[in-house]
Image (spheres, rainbow, N blue to C red):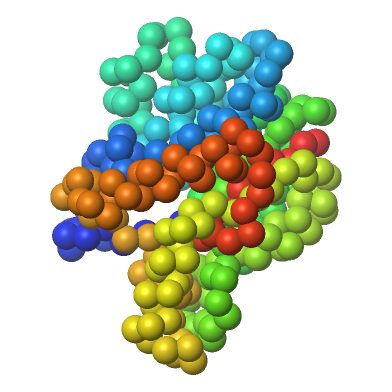
Amino acid sequence: MSMTILGSARLETDPHLYFRILVHLEQGHWWWRLMAAIETAWLDRILIGRRNGVALDLGCGAGATLERLARRSELQRVIGVEPVAEALIHAHFRQSASISKNRIPYLVRGAGERLPVASQSVDFVMCLDVIQHLPIASRPALLLEISRVLRPGGHLVLRSNAPPLFRCRVSSVAREEQPIHPRELFKWCANAGLRVRRSSRANAVGSLYEELRALLKRGWRRSPTASGHPAGRGLVLDSNGDRTRSSRLAHAIAAWETAWVGRWGLPLPVGHSFWLHAEV
């Protein structure tokens, strides 16, 4: 996910401040609530009837997904892997403050291309908004590593950014950050021995609004900025709050989309986020 947080000039040089604001946004912003609801609905189907499972949150960040995983009765152990030390600090304090001692996830610093986890030791992997931040050459290796650590019959839920609906020239300045096309993910999964069971785009209405706004502002043939997003800045979040009229409308729309993609399991053809469920 490409993301800009308004009013955050210090964030690029102050990781602690970045993750502190991130924790605040994860607790109530409509985008995170939408994604968390889809995640929960998909997990309800995947984990039904399971007991004593081991889950891995790859790229756990400040720990929002870890916290939800640790509260699931189907999982006995939860592992969080994250390359950024500041994120792990926030994740540690977050879990310690809200989860009983015997349910606190095990946190380890590591990279997705070389997971510090034994082969065939995990039943479930969550990988949210990680793969698009890796160098292009390393992305297939991430799927291979996930396949390595999963036990036979294990599951992967992956979320990435996705190409815009409207075609426009993409800047070559930051090709590493360009949205990933779903067929690339399908190919990498197949090569890693992962069978795709389900997929859908998400954030449909919000992404369409951003694209139309960008097209009206920039024109059909104008190239986007280095972020590769048609609006030029990715997902724009206001760190001052989520109480505007447009945000309340977004919450209502997100609730409908949660039911469509999550509870009913119907795929959406548009959206700047892409969800994928695969199985070994």
Give the camera-side residue of 64 and 62.
64
Indicate the position of residue 268 as horizontal and vertical percent values: 62, 53
Indicate the position of residue 75 as horizontal and vertical percent values: 59, 16
Q: Which of the image's four quarters has the C terminus? A: top right
The mark tally for this picture is 0
Indicate the position of residue 5 as horizontal and vertical percent values: 26, 57
Residue drawn at (16%, 50%) of the image: 240
Give the camera-side residue of 258 and 84.
258
The relative height of residue 134 versus residue 212 in the rendered view (above or below) is: above
Residue drawn at (48%, 88%) of the image: 220
Indicate the position of residue 133 as horizontal and vertical percent values: 51, 59
Residue drawn at (50%, 31%) of the image: 80
The quarter of the picture where residue 118 lies is: top right
**Residue 64 in sight in this render:** yes
The quarter of the picture where residue 209 lies is: bottom left
Give the camera-side residue of 72 and 116.
72
Lateral position of residue 245 relative to residue 197, left or right: left
Residue drawn at (39%, 77%) of the image: 214
Which residue is most to the bottom? 221
The quarter of the picture where residue 229 lies is: bottom left
The relative height of residue 41 versus residue 184 in the rendered view (above or below) is: above
**Residue 22 in sight in this render:** no
